[in-house]
Each structure stands twice: as C-alpha cells, then as structure tokens.
Image (cartoon, rainbow, N blue to C red):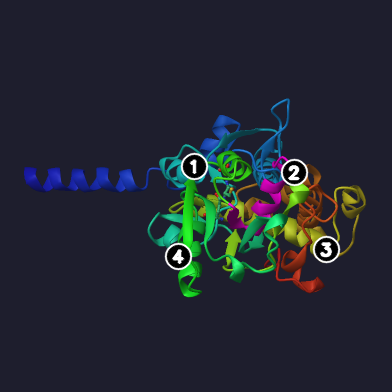
Amino acid sequence: MKTILALLAGAAVALVGTNAFAQQTLKSVKDRGELVCGVSKGLPGFSAPDASGRWSGFDVDMCRAVAAAVLGDPNKVKFVPLNAEERFPALQKGDVDLLSRNSTWTLEREAKLGLLFAGISYYDGQGFLVPNARKLTSSLELDNSKVCVQAGTTAAAATEEYFKTNNMKLELVSVPNSADMVKAYDEGKCDTLTTDVSQLYALRLNMTKPADHIVLPDVISKEPLGPVVRQGDDKWFNIVKWSLFAMLNAEELGVTTANLDAALQSQKPDVKRLLGLEGKLGEELGLSNDFAARIVKAVGNYGESFERNVGASSKLGIPRGVNQLWSMGGIQYAPPIR
Ligand SMILES: N[C@@H](CCC(=O)N[C@@H](CS)C(=O)NCC(=O)O)C(=O)O
C-alpha cells in the first residue's frame, strides 16, 4: 500500500512538474501587473530600444497589443532581450510569458521543444546580403563565399543545404548576436550575410555604409514568423492568437487608431463584434469585451503597425508583398471575430 501511495505521489509531482505553467499564464500576468515579453537584442524595425530605453518595433507591438488586451495598458511590458540560442529555453523555463522575436514556425519547435506558434505575423523567407562591389545578381553566384550566420537560427542548416544542392563551396562563419554579425561583415570576416530577408533590411541599417550593400532577389526558404507560447496553456495561447487576429481583422474592417472613436459608433455588425459593442466574445476569451479596441488604440491595426515599423515608408522600406491582406492580394488571412 505504502509503495502504491509513494508511486502515486511521485506521479502527481511529475504531472505538476510538466504542467507547472498549465493555465497559469493569464493569472500570473494579471497578478504581476506586467507582461514579460522576449524580444531580440536590437533589430531596428522589429525590436530595439531607443536612447531613453523605450522599446519599439513590429515584434514589440505584438507584446504591447497583448499587454493592452490583458492589462489595459500597452506600457505594462517588461522586455527581455534574447539572442537566438537563448530565446526558446527562456520561454520553456517560464522566464518570459510570450516570445515575440522573429521566430520561424517549424515542426521541430512545436514537437520537440514543447512550444506553440500562435499565428503568423510576418511571412518571410531566407535571403542573402552582399556588398555591391561583388557585382552579384543571384544567390546562385555565391560559390566560394564566406557566409555569416547567427547561431541557433534556422539559417545555418538551410544555407548548408542550399550550397550543397547547388554544388557551391561554402565557408560558414557562425556568430552569437546580430551586432556581431554586422561587425564581422563590416570587418570583412565574411563577404555575405544570411538570415530572413526582413532582418537583412534591419541589419543593413546598422552598417557603416548601408547603401553599399544589396539584398539579392532570391528567397531560399519559408520563414513564417510569429509569436510563441508554451504548450499546456490553451487559454493563454488563445489570447495571444486572437490578439494577432484582432489586429488583422481591424485592418480588414478599416478600423484604425485615427478612426477608432467613429468606429465605436458604427452600426456594422462585424465592426461592433470586433470592438466588443455586441456579444461577449472578449469575456469568453478571458479578457474584457473591448480587448480589440484596446489593441487598436495602443498599436493600431496590423497594417498600421507594419507600415510604421518596417513598411515602404519606414526606415527599413520593406514592401508589404505577401504580407498584404488576402482581400488585397496577399496571404494574411485571420479567422473572423464572431
Ligand atoms: N527566423 C529565424 C532567424 C531568427 C534570428 O534570430 N535572426 C537573427 C538574424 S541577425 C536575429 O534576429 N538576431 C537578433 C538578435 O540576436 O538580437 C529563426 O527563427 O531561427
């Protein structure tokens, strides 16, 4: 009997151990009064602190959107800068509630690491950046290149695969952080940079002479980027997922930061549902019914955040491309708020 009891107690401890965060994230965030969000260490347009230490960017907006939805205040966020190798262990250990750091949704990261991607906030793909002086027009001309890549990313293996498939000779130079990547390239330790195309645009801004480098047109992989949470907390997963979907639906319905007050008077059923003027969808999610209105007020709709941080008229100057809404010819498609 004693042995059976001991075994049962052991099993219970093991269960609690694996489910330590189960269904707890919303409660801990509310009790703490602050969302702890994992971001990159400094990638202009995506997540970077300004001189006064205030973080901004497309990935940062996702953190602020969730804080606005959950706590009613986009400033109640503690940003934890993480390099590529640190990011998933930090989420697994519970050091962050949410990871919003240009992370690619792959099978391994869900099946092996016990994580869940809440959606795709940016459809990206891996590309190459080279000095204009190399006079290249395609990544198929990269034979005998010294390629800088960040450790712990999807890029190292994909680069090896690409060079091998195309019978090109490769020397990989692996660095731990994006700052080291720019430094190594600026100092000539590598003659090519590789990562997701969006990040190449961001890294170029940090180079001594940005105009001297081009992003080659080829894209060699699929890099669907999005916010990540731990498995085992469906409630929290849904909150993050629907915060992103709320931003996309707001754009689709034409609700912006500027017209939010007018939209709150709208008689259109789908606008009323989005803004919580009809139904109890927000409460059913575990939030308040106006969660989407809070998000739009805080960071704008998806298109506003994209344009402000990384879009054609921002410093990065990235065309909206496939990240345009499905209704505008792109592939961004969020399930409806109903
Ligand atoms: N999307 C890829 C790449 C992500 C990644 O970490 N890219 C580097 C490119 S430089 C980066 O953003 N570094 C920022 C940092 O270390 O702070 C992945 O999930 O593995």
Judged by depth in the image, the label closer to the viewer, 2 or 3, is 2
Which residue is rendered at x = 60% and y = 49% of the image?
Answer: 286
Q: Residues within 10 Å of mark 3 (few under 14, many from 20)?
A: some
Callout 2–callout 3 Cβ contact below 8 Å: no
Mark 2 or mark 3: name the one nearer the start of the chain: 2
Q: Residue 301: image x %, image y %? A: 78, 54
Mark-to-mark CA distance, 4 and 1: 23 Å
Per the image, the residue denoted by label 3 is 253
Mark-to-mark CA distance, 2 and 1: 23 Å
Mark-to-mark CA distance, 4 and 3: 32 Å
Per the image, the residue denoted by label 2 is 209
Mark-to-mark CA distance, 2 and 3: 41 Å
Q: Residues within 10 Å of mark 2 (few under 14, many from 20)?
A: few
Mark 2 or mark 1: name the one nearer the start of the chain: 1
Which residue is rendered at x = 7% and y = 42% of the image?
Answer: 2
Q: Residue 51: image x %, image y %? A: 73, 27
Per the image, the residue denoted by label 1 is 176
Ligand 1 neighbours mark 1 (CB distance < 8 Å)? yes
Q: Is residue 193 magenta?
A: yes
Going by the numbered disc 2, the residue's amino acid type is Lys
Which part of the image, by quadrant, shows the C terminus? bottom right
Using the image, tell me which numbered label, if any, was put on residue 107.
4
